[in-house]
């Protein structure tokens, strides 16, 4: 059940991008998200795309991993695109896509009804049980249909609505998709090529100025790395408890809501106990090794800023300058 | 009846780069009313094997027949929950599965999941607590405030209250003190003798294997490499060496004595008393000793 959850995106490898200072990578990846919003015409977007492509291709990370990290939000990307098409109300119309919407509604509706009926009947045949046609949800569905038919036939409401697509909306939508893909590629690249420990170290360094206002930066960094460390362990424990309760007849997939609540509790309580126990053990182990919160600690891994890192930062500044010069 | 494995394969992390075969072509026939030990090294597939016995894991390919239910690999099997009532699986460190406010409620969780009424479940909880040798006045206590050994017994009572025909135990004595281990094993043996429960025991302790099991299954890298009588295994030194298994203490002692005194003894002796008698006989001094 929990087999497919992969944590820590780090991929083993070696290239110039892997060897970059994590501080530079972290700050520049964030900076990139900010400056990408400055791009607003084809030349700036082209520059941003080329820039990202060069980094991505030379980083040595196989492209399929980028595809994998974009895949989960494809729905979101298309949703934003269509939302943009709907609500952009300015500029020159783009005729091929202008549709009278009620025709589409009718077609979609017909498809929905047919698939629903097919689904119901095949399920009935599959299970060899009394037709479920008289179930409550089906009755409701039929009722809604009848009412809708009645409304369409006997009301004098104007059911046609002209949906106008504008050329600018299409272009803008394309830019939005491109922008999202670029942002995700850059930030994925950061997590792909930087070990979680290096990343927390970088966070610690970047947040160091906050120490002036007594913000516990190193404690925060330690908390982050401990959390990251224990996620897989706790997942494993969850799986064990899940199996143990399943062996006691708990069914986490079926049953009504009341049963489900009890069954979730049977999973949550042991997990809380296990987490607290682990936390206590870890706290003792840390104390035994002389950890005192707030005391200055040295780090096993020293970050080193090299010439390449400076060039990396400079390239982003150049890109920003390009954006400022060429944007509309 | 019983549990049958027919060419069962199981792959972990299927379809990823870490794909690994945990079970390879397992053919196994487990009869009811037997006491079986499963041994093998860490990572040999013991846990995976026993999790197939109550359909917690389902085979990638092959068929597992559990009592009268057939689980076909690589397919979605329906209504398998009922199997888990009849094959009770006690995981390693089962005390972590306790979650209710009282011991009674926790033991009742299993029976209630299988549709037993509240009253009946309460009666079963009482009985189960008796079987694991705990006092009835623990029933209203919180299971989380008990001692480690008591917690484990309560957890096992939670499985016993479901009244399974087969009891599968994954290292039930791990982490207990020697006295607790002994009591725990006696308890399972009593369940086996008095209630005709089929016991399948995963363990690393060869002494318990020698003492209680009629049949031993040795797993190595996902395959069954030995399946047969307990004493046939311990007499087969080549196999023991090949798979880095241990011998029971008593067998080691017998071998030591044989080497030191240059005599031959029966290697199937399994108690100290019998060994003493055999020694007396072998040394031909029965009259002098008495």
Image (cartoon, rainbow, N blue to C red):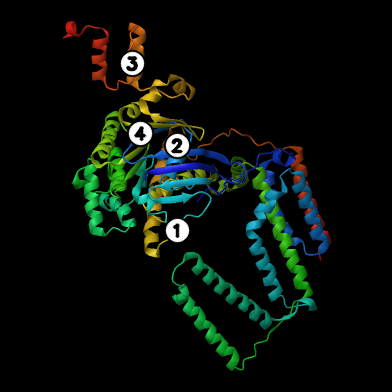
* Mark 3 Cα shell of 10 Å, populated few (<14), some (14-19), many (≥20): some
Image coordinates for residue B223, horizontal then vertical, percent = 50, 34
The residue carrying mark 2 is B46
The reply to whether residue B204 is in sight is no
Across and down, in percent, residue A154 comes to: 58, 93
Classed neighbour count for the residue bearing mark 4: other residues with Cα under 10 Å, few (<14), some (14–19), many (≥20):
few
Frontmost of labels 2 and 1 is 2
Could you tell me which secondary element the residue under label 3 belongs to? helix
Q: Where does the image place residue A303, in percent across and percent down from the top left?
A: 65, 37
Q: Classify 10 Å Cα crowding around label 1: few (below 14), some (14-19), many (20 and above).
A: few
Name which of mark 2 and mark 4 comes first in the sequence. Answer: 2
Host chain of mark 1: A
Percent position (x, y) of residue B253? 33, 16
Q: CA distance from mark 2 to mark 4?
A: 19 Å
Mark closer to the observer (3, 1): 3
Residue at mark 2: chain: B
* Label 2 in the same subunit as label 1: no
- Determine which of the numbered discs, if any, sits on residue A253 in the image: 1
The answer to whether residue B58 is left or right of residue A17 is: left
Viewed as shown, does residue A168 lie left or right of B205? right
Q: Give the spatial CA distance, label 1 vs label 4.
A: 33 Å
């Amino acid at each position: 059940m929990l087999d497919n959850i992969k944590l820590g995106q780090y991929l083993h490898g070696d290239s110039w991008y892997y060897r970059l200072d994590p501080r530079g990578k972290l700050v520049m990846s964030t900076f990139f998200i900010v400056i990408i919003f400055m791009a607003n015409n084809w030349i700036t977007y082209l520059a941003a795309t080329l820039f990202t492509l060069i980094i991505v291709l030379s980083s040595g990370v196989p492209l399929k991993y980028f595809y994998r990290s974009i895949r989960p939000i494809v729905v979101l990307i298309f949703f934003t695109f269509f939302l943009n098409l709907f609500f952009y109300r300015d500029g020159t119309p783009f005729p091929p896509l202008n549709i009278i919407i009620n025709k589409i509604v009718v077609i979609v509706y017909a498809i929905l009804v047919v698939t629903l009926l097919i689904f119901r009947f095949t399920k009935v045949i599959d299970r060899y049980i009394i037709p479920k046609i008289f179930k409550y949800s089906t009755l409701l569905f039929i009722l809604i249909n009848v009412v809708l038919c009645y409304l369409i036939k006997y009301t004098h409401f104007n059911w046609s609505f002209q949906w106008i697509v504008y050329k600018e909306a299409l272009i803008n939508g394309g830019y939005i998709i491109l922008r999202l893909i670029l942002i995700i590629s850059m930030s994925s690249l950061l997590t792909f090529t930087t070990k979680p420990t290096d990343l927390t170290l970088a966070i610690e360094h970047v947040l160091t100025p906050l120490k002036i206002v007594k913000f516990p930066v190193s404690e925060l960094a330690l908390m982050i790395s401990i959390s990251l460390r224990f996620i897989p362990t706790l997942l494993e424990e969850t799986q064990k408890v899940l199996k143990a309760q399943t062996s006691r007849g708990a069914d986490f997939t079926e049953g009504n809501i009341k049963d489900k609540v009890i069954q979730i509790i049977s999973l949550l309580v042991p997990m809380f106990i296990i987490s607290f126990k682990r936390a206590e053990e870890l706290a003792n182990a840390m104390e035994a090794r002389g950890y005192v919160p707030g005391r200055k600690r040295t780090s096993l891994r020293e970050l080193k800023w090299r010439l390449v890192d400076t060039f990396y930062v400079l390239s982003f500044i150049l890109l920003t300058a390009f954006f400022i010069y060429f944007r509309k | 009846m019983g549990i049958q494995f027919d060419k069962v394969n199981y792959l972990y992390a299927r379809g990823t780069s870490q794909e690994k075969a945990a079970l390879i072509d397992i053919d196994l026939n487990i009869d009811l009313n037997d006491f079986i030990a499963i041994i093998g090294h860490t990572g040999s597939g013991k846990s995976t094997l026993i999790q197939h016995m109550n359909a917690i894991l389902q085979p990638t390919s092959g068929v597992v027949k559990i009592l009268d239910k057939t689980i076909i690999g690589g397919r979605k099997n329906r209504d398998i929950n009922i199997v888990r009532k009849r094959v009770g699986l006690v995981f390693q460190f089962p005390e972590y599965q306790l979650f209710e406010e009282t011991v009674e409620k926790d033991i009742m969780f299993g029976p209630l999941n299988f549709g037993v009424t509240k009253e009946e479940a309460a009666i079963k909880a009482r009985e189960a607590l008796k079987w694991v040798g705990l006092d009835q006045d623990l029933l209203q206590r919180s299971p989380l405030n008990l001692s480690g050994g008591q917690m484990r017994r309560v957890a096992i009572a939670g499985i016993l209250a479901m009244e399974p025909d087969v009891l599968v135990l994954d290292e039930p004595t791990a982490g207990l003190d020697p006295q607790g281990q002994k009591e725990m094993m006696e308890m399972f043996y009593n369940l086996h003798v008095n209630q005709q429960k089929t016991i399948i025991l995963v363990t690393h302790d060869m002494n318990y294997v020698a003492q209680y099991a009629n049949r031993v299954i040795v797993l190595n890298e996902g395959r069954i490499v030995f399946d047969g009588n307990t004493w046939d295994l311990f007499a087969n030194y080549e196999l023991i060496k090949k798979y880095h298994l241990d011998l029971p203490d008593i067998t080691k002692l017998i071998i030591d004595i044989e080497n030191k005194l240059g005599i031959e003894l029966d290697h199937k002796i399994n108690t100290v008393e019998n060994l003493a008698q055999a020694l007396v006989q072998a040394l031909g001094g029965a009259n002098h000793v008495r």
